[in-house]
Image (tube, helix red, strand yellow):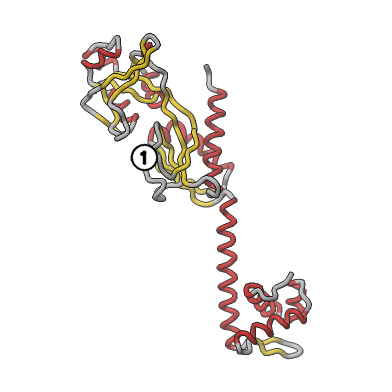
Amino acid sequence: MSFFGDRTGDLEVFTVVVDTGSFSAAGRALDLAPSSVGRVIDRIEARLGVRLLLRTTRSLTLTPEGAAYLSAARRILCDLRETEQAISDQSVPRGRLRVSTSILYGRMVLVPLLGDFVRRYPGIVLDISLTDAVVDIAAGQADVGIRFGPLPDGPLTARKLGETRKVIVASPDYLARRGTPEIPEDLHGHDCLGFNFRRASPTWPFRRDGRDYALTIRGSVEANNGETLGQLAAEGVGITRVGAETVRDAIRAGDLVPLLEEFNPGDVEEIHAVFLGRGHMPARVRCFVDYLVERRRGSERTAPE
């Protein structure tokens, strides 16, 4: 091991000499000859122009300048080790991981998966936010976000987690009051609840006799998430078109009824995990996204037909 010409190495040699109390002991600790250790100390003192150690045949004593140099050397070496450790940690799954997802997806899908993830990666501290507000991943508000539907262009990387088919639903109470639409065009006489996203189109797609077409819809309420629209529909406010997973429980409970299924074009809403970076992302981000993809594929293989 050579420290010659390496100022960081000089610092380490100096601290080991002080800690061990002799050139011989320091040489054994560093796998260097005592004469080599002595030359390193001589070089440091010559560079600084001051004596750092008072040497006798039996002892080494720090001068005031040597004590100041020792304090600085320890601080520099400690900072270097911490910096190297922080960089090295990028390849090890540890640290705080901030994840943001919608309230419904978090409650129904994500949270039930987290226990196994925490047991698998004990070095990661999960920081979960369930919110229907869209957080800005690019601005550092979270490390990973779960997104539904089309993704806008931008700096984020996306991994597909799955998809959910779209379904038109209304409550039995609403249908009793307003009637059940038999064909898509009947929706013109109904209150159709839609999304308020700028990218959201005020049309719903249909398929009839093998031909796809879109129908403009209008309603009294718009919202930024499917859970709210599903709840409004279950309260009898109107008819809505959302992801089937969003209203799965309400359909099973009879609070919502699927409509116009024979005209359903079969389009789906894709679900993605989005995050910054691709090549050198922190290990905690990479292993979390890989875990979600793995669990989603596993659930699709075991899902009943």
Q: With respect to residue 108, does 92 lie above or below?
A: below
Q: Quadrant of residue 209?
A: top left
Residue 2: x percent and y percent? 72, 72
Which residue is denoted by mark 1 in the rendering? Answer: 131
Residue 93: x percent and y percent? 57, 48
Secondary structure under tag 1 reads: loop
Position of 197 with respect to 12 (left or right) is left
Q: Quadrant of residue 266?
A: top left
Q: With respect to residue 173, does 38 lie above or below?
A: below
Q: Quadrant of the N terminus?
A: bottom right
Residue 179: x percent and y percent? 24, 11
Please tell me which residue lies in front, 1 or 59: 1
At label 1, the amino acid type is Thr
Please tell me which residue lies in front, 96 or 143: 143
How many marks on residues?
A: 1
Position of 7 with respect to 112 (left or right) is right
Please tell me which residue lies in front, 30 or 129: 30
Residue name at image x 66 percent, y 78 percent: 14
Residue name at image x 55 percent, y 47 percent: 279
Position of 197 with respect to 105 (left or right) is left
